[in-house]
Amino acid sequence: MNLNRHRSWITPLVIGAFALSAVTGVLMFFHLDSGLNKAAHEWLSWAMLAGAGLHAALNLPAFKRYFSLRTPLLVMGAFVLLLGVSFVQPAGSAKEPPFAAPVHALAQAPIPVLAQVLGTNEAMLTEQLRQAGHTVDAEHQTLESLVGSDLRAQIGALKRLMPASGG
């Protein structure tokens, strides 16, 4: 495939995808994102990846040359090192996502309290739990005692118990 005849849209693809990714990324960094910013950043970054790959292929001789020069190798190596470090779990840091604490707190609430938080009554919540295959035999039981301490199990149970939202 002769990529030179596609140059008129490959480089603009990289420019547009970079602009979108940069702006949405900065908005997310400062917690100013709204609407579809996060989804656009996550999903449309694939356009950036495709555009960068096509751009590298379009400029293959120059791209290859960077792998034989000291300064470009140092810069690329630094980013590879930073990528590797980004997988390291800092000592003392939480291993669960930030939303885990409130989920666990809800799962540890007695059934009557959980019913109140979910905007239902204890009898209806108990019936929902029974229909989901859980044995509720005391009002002081918690969702955690029924589904366990696994975050995903607690989230799944809470999602099934939440009233359907209208929006």
Image (cartoon, helix red, strand yellow):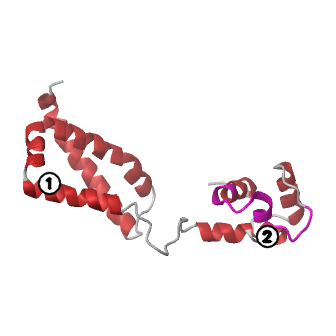
- Stretch in magenta: 137-153
**Eye-nearest disc, 1 or 2:** 1
Report the side of 166 relative to 135 (left or right).
left
Please give the name of the residue rendered at 45% of the width and 58% of the height, measured from the top-left corner: 35
Against 49, residue 143 (above or below) is below
Badge 1: few (under 14), some or many (20 or more) residues near its Cα, within 10 Å? Answer: few
Kindly identify which numbered label has been placed on residue 116. Answer: 2
Report the side of 18 relative to 134 (left or right).
left
Whether 157 is among the magenta residues is no
In the image, what residue type sits under mark 2? Gln
Against 49, residue 149 (above or below) is below
Report the side of 17 relative to 140 (left or right).
left
In the image, what residue type sits under mark 1? Leu
Please give the name of the residue rendered at 85% of the width and 65% of the height, measured from the top-left corner: 121
Q: Position of residue 78 (x, y in %)?
A: 22, 61
Kindly identify which numbered label has been placed on residue 73. Answer: 1
Q: Position of residue 138 (x, y in %)?
A: 91, 67
